[in-house]
Image (tube, rainbow, N blue to C red):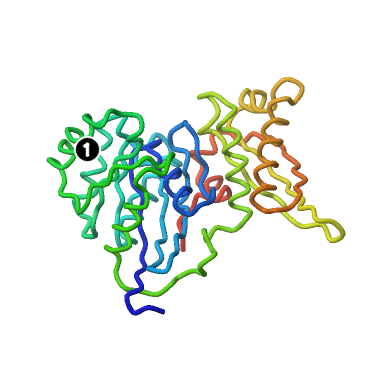
Amino acid sequence: MDNNYRSGFVALIGRPNVGKSTLMNHVVGQKIAIMSDKPQTTRNKIRGVYTDERGQVVFLDTPGIHKPHSKLGEFLVKTARDALDEVDLVLFLIDAAEGYGPGDRYIMENLRNVKTPVFLVVNKIDQVHPDELLPLIDRYRKEFSFNEVVPISALQGNNTSTLMDLLISHLPEGPQYYPADQVTDHPERFIVGELIREKVLEMTREEIPHSVAVVIEEMKRREDKDIVDVRAVIYTERPSQKGILIGKKGSLLKEVGKRAREEMERLLGTRIFLDLWVKVKKDWRNEEMMLRQFGYREEE
């Protein structure tokens, strides 16, 4: 391996819904984090791996930093803050179209004690006039000393190659942590569960999204056929939410299952038989035992 090979861990930090998952999926070239127009979509630190001949970048796509209103919310914010202590570099993403907000000031306060380099990444530049960018950037620079400022459009891929060039140049010399063809360290079961949750987010309104957890109870390949059987349970907090999720004559649940199955088949390259159920666990977002059962627990 080249003596100048660089590698390291990079945290993606920002308000909810600024495009952190979109950026990571674009860079690694595959969906490994779910995307939604609803905030607080990401609930775990999802590692995405980018590798080329110069180096390897391991991204931590963290939950959006926000003021928590439940034990789940507290877990999400702690997860995001803890990521700052584990990395070689921090990318602070902002939404150019949304502009400066109190949430950004709150995040920059959290970044003041960070000793690693911090890049300001101005996302969604395709949604604003170029003349609006410089005043916006100046506003942020007055409050924090960023090592680099990079305007991008994660959705369209604008200027993301420049961002990757700068990232790799700022990382220390180091080993290749993952094989070159590996894009995430999460198991298939986790990704499959996230795809189901994404389809729920796509098809439901505000009363549902944050009350949903998905548990993959079984996932195994049939011995005699190229089919993977997946049995999954979507948990909600109230019976009324269960009714909404199932829909009239099961129509909404069927559509969620159809969309999730199609994406799983593209991802895994095999046929999927998806058995989908909906169950109620009252107020699970505030129950420590339920949070651990659903996978929201401290990493050892």
Report the front residue among 195 and 295: 195
Report the quarter where the N terminus lies: bottom left
Q: In this picture, is 37 found above or below 297?
A: above
Q: Is residue 221 left or right of residue 6?
A: right
Q: In percent of the image, x 45 and y 56: which residue is there?
A: 298
Residue farthest top in this picture:
248
Q: Relative to 146, does residue 201 appear above or below in the rendering?
A: above
**Toward the viewer: 129 or 275?**
129
Q: Is residue 225 left or right of residue 234?
A: right
The correct choice, above or below, for 110 with respect to 282 in the image is below
Q: Position of residue 177 (x, y in %)?
A: 45, 70
Q: Tell me what residue is drawn at x 52 percent, y 69 percent.
A: 179
* Residue matched to label 1: 105
For mark 1, does the 10 Å Cα neighbourhood hold few (<14), some (14 to 19), or many (20 or more) residues? some
Q: Position of residue 234 (x, y in %)?
A: 64, 38
Left or right for 110, reference 234: left
Q: In the image, 258: left or right of 30?
A: right
Q: Residue drawn at (42%, 46%), measured in percent from left and top? A: 23
Residue 51 location, quadrant? bottom left
Locate residue 102, reporting x and y percent: 24, 32
Question: Element type at marker 1?
Answer: helix
- The residue closer to the viewer here, 244 or 294, is 244
Numbered disc total: 1
Identity of the residue furthest to the left in this view? 142
**Amino acid type, mark 1:** Arg
Quadrant of res 254: top right
